[in-house]
Amino acid sequence: MGDSGMMSLALVATFWERNSSVDLAMLQVETSPAVLGAKPHGLRGELSALKIDRGRKRRTSVLAIVVWLLVGGGVLSAAAGVGYWALKDRLFPLPVVKAESVRVMTLGQAQTKLTATGYLESRFQAAVGAKVPGRIANIPVEEGSKVKKGDVLAELEHADLDAMLASRKVAVEVAKAQLSEAQFNAKQAELDLGREHEVFSRNAGTKAALDRAQTNYEAAGAVYRAREAAVQAANSSVEEAQQAVNNMFIYAPFDGTVLTKDAEKGESIMPGGMGASSGRGSVITLANLEQLEVDTDVKEDYLGQLHKGQPTQVAVDAVPDRRYEGRLREIIRMGDRTRGIVKVKVSILDPDERLFPDLSATVNFLPDSPGDSGKQSLEKGVFAPVAAIQGTGDSQSVWVLEAEHVRKAAVKTEGEPHDGLVAIASGLSGGERLVVSPPADLKDGEQVKTAE
């Protein structure tokens, strides 16, 4: 047999050993003289010479038995484990509990009767403009400037009015001079009339001379009165020109803070202007930030819970670290039939510099209570669900849920419950999850399952 034949025998033996677990000893090659003496006829001849002795018994390897036992045991263990975890909840069910969180909030939030959202606005806010059209010459204030009533917010160009005012003041001086002359003439006419009366009484004068003196006196009086009226008219003209000049200045109508500058130097303004084509309508937007309030809406169904002067607590989204004391100022007596709401105004009693108009705010309407309830409502505390508290007096406790296990903790409450919450004096710090309405047989450290 050549090299190729020997290699073929080796490959076949390896194949059968790996795939049929047949020992090499079971492979016998027919070695009869005829075969040995025959010339090889290729690979087919060599393969046909191979025979399997099926009479010999197979020998099972000990290693194979061990492997099969290990594999079978592993499969059985895995199946048992899967079955245990699949049936665990049915065989050994965990107690199902409901949990709620311990909250840190103000007393006002805990005692809230009704909550509404709205926006801050100033009770006194105005877009301030000029009475007359003109071009802005100067704006001496900036955004954020605090001004007093009567302070100048802007000035319009008024050189022509200044000239007119000066001219009319000169006219007043002329009218006064003419009045002085008329006064002198009237006095002289009065003296001449007196002398003519005296001469005529002594029969030394004529009636014609007396009549002329009388006429001159009356004419001088008429001129004097005309000059007085001219002076008054001139003064009125001056006042008119002065008012026209004053109209070129825009004054603050009340104490406040400049929110925005609506125009700049050089721009033209027009009272009631509707855009750039007709000029600016206002120059400054002014608001009194010391008198802020929340403009909010309340559904008609809840209107019976509110009344004028009711204490409130205001939370502003832009100031998350503070709650403001408020008071219901006014319930606007006008409903909205399409939305079923009523507008309510809530004044903020302690505003600070962080508040300004158009910020979103949440109003918590509080129940009336004696004392300084407004300040007390701003104090923070720890509040837990009443249903989680067990026991009374000094024997109060709760079940704290930690991961999937419960822990019993002693607590102490204070005050009266409100809306399902009670204040915690000691034992909890906030953020814990408590089991509410716990089962009677619950044990410390026991594993539980929370309800969905």
Image: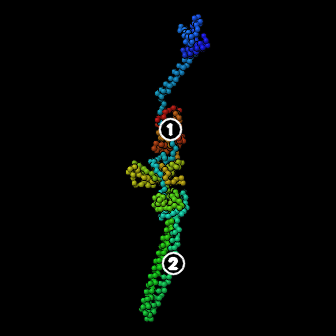
- Disc nearest the viewer among 2 and 1: 2
Q: Secondary structure at mark 1?
A: strand
Which amino acid lies under the numbered mark 1 shown in the image of this protein?
Answer: Leu
Quadrant in which the N terminus appears: top right
Residue position for label 1 = 434
Circle 1 Cα neighbour tier, 10 Å, few/some/many (<14 / 14–19 / ≥20):
many
> Residue 93: x and y, percent?
47, 29
Q: Is residue 293 above or below residue 18?
A: below
Q: What residue lies at 53% left-to-right and 32% top-to-bottom?
A: 445
The answer to which of 121 and 396 lies nearer the viewer is 121
Q: Are marks 2 and 1 in contact (CB under 8 Å)?
A: no
CA gap between label 2 and label 1 equals: 95 Å
Numbered disc total: 2
Residue position for label 2 = 174
Q: Examine the rendering and report whether any part of residue 54 can be seen.
A: yes
Q: What residue lies at 51% left-to-right and 63% top-to-bottom?
A: 135
Image quadrant assignment for residue 308: bottom left
